[in-house]
Amino acid sequence: MSTGMTTGGIAGRTAGRTALDRLWDLIRRRPWLALAVLTALQTAGTLSSRALWFSDEVRYADAYAGLLRGHWLVLSLNGVAYPDKPPLYFWFLRLLDALPGLPPGSDGPAVFFLGAAVSGLLVLYATLLWARVLRLPDGAGALAGLLLLTTLFFAGLLHYSRMDLLFAALIIAAQAAFCAAFAPFDGLNAKARRTWLCTLALGLAGLATLTKGPLGLLFPLLTTWLFLAWRGRAREFFRAGMLPGLAALIVLVFSWVVAAYFVQGPEFLHKIFYEQIFQRATKTFHHAEPWYFYLVAFPPCWLPWTLALAALPLRRLFAGAFWRGLWAGRKSSSPEADAKAWLWFSCISGLTLLSLLSGKVVVYILPQLPPLALLLALALLDGAAPRPWRRLWTAAGLLFLALAGLTTQAGRFLPVPLSETGDLPGTWAVAGGFAACGLGLLVLRGQDARRVLPALALLTALWVQPAAQVLSPRLDAIMSPKPQADVLKAYAAKGYLPVAHDIYQGIYSYYIGGVVRETAGFNILDQLVAGQDVVLAIKKKHWAAWSTRPRHLEIVLEQWLAGQPYYVVVSRKDASPPPLHNLPAAP
């Protein structure tokens, strides 16, 4: 059906449909405000609803707590230098932590979830900016923002404390600046304008690099060079206008590198450049996956909009004439063709680059969602080429109804029951929200996207809010190390040495509020247990493999955490029974 709408047709709609028209008109005219309100609708009241989860959330929280103690230039984790991540995201959190009315970051997780929500909004704003720079049709950026807000993966990340959303926002902003820099324009100041915009783009890429690493630079540079090469303009990439930006990038990034060298020495830089960058790219020690990992992981992350494949004319992709025409017209520049080329190169080159790296994590694909959202928004707004979008809304509606049914049975799939009845609190409320989204899509399946997506954005809050405020806190018992950390902290207050054996670094430090002794070999563990009073966190499988384990050790807590059971064990050096009173309640 055509997306074009006449004034008379809109006027003849029912009151409910007129309300959707007015809502879209408000979003289109005030997209910056509208997307902020819709983001708040999903995140308001959720900043302190749950504990921090295994593993990155609690590790980043401890790094931030170290920043508050003075380690603001080189982060620390469990009392030692932390080379895994640059500090920019944690500086960003510190700015948010200074807002009035927000609990201090060292006392609660509110600032971490506020950081996720604000970072997500910055992704939406960068997408709006990119749409404006690309001169996309009116409303395309706002429609792309609605697509992102209604994507299951993106909506979930608004409630998960990581730096990836801020990382993606800076990458998209850098790509927008490069698009503006290499857009065709004339005038006396054209050369100076291009130089300034390239400097801005490389500065934003530098900030992205200081947020999470070199991909923040590689993504926008690769996209820009491929676009210029496609248009036969590759030489422009290497002109003198790029030099001021390159100088700004080097000053920005290497100022921190040099400062880190003087604070921690050459060994710290070796860990950054060799272990964290080179090894993770070529032969990682962590998160190694096959090259096709993202081909499998990406479609679920783009749901429900992966189902747009059911509405797109894919047959022409198998026609040689389509590809011959695409190649023949690669140097025929027009605003619309340039915009689509930028977006496709951004998405495809990013996924290709990620697939070539040894280390792969699902969340790394986040910078590829905004260009895909803009491309889908363009297709939805294309009134000149009607497409059967009714099939997309129907398929997405059925998906949400299926999710509603699965959510009601979620308690059955948990490794341990979280209530006496075996039910999982909050599941029915979340299922009701999914069902509302599904029914809304089915009712509106014959409507234009400018009506469907605003309605779906409002309905999304019906499942996100109960998921964040009711369901997620109940999952703390199997997702957060806080129950173990609370027991470790209670015994540490009695004079016991807190120890974690062969467990991810820094898992307990934030909630304990101090350093935990971490061991890898049983010989060291034997010495600690023999020489002092110890409270020990250990995986059940390692407990069973500890052949020299003393018999007087007492298990005081068992918790299923992130896929396997853990024990908290107490030992006194004189082999007497440990005190078991005044312990935190078991989850």
Image (cartoon, grey):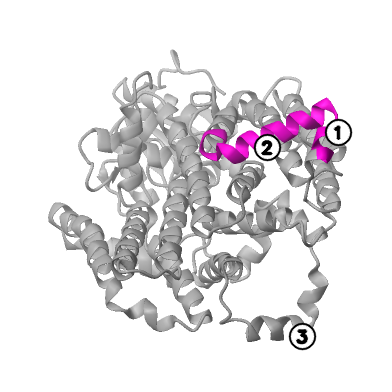
What's the residue at 47%, 56% (across, down)?
172
Say whether residue 172 is visible. yes
Which circle's residue, 3 or 2, is located before the other in the chain?
Answer: 2
Examine the residues drawn in magenta and state their main secondary structure.
helix
Q: Position of residue 143 (x, y in %)?
A: 64, 46
* Label 1: few (<14), some (14–19) or many (≥20) C-alpha neighbours in 10 Å: few
- The label on residue 12 is 1
Residue 402 image point, x, y percent: 83, 41
Q: Is residue 503 visible?
A: no
- Residue type highlighted by circle 3: Gly
Which mark, by number, is residue 553? none
The residue mark sitting in front, 3 or 2, is 2
Task: Give the magenta-colored segment's residue range.
Answer: 8-34
| 563 up-or-down from 187: above or below | above
- In the image, 372 versus 556, the foreground residue is 372
Q: Mark 3 = which residue? A: 320
Image quarter in which the C terminus is found:
top right
Seen in the image, is 568 located left or right of residue 384? left
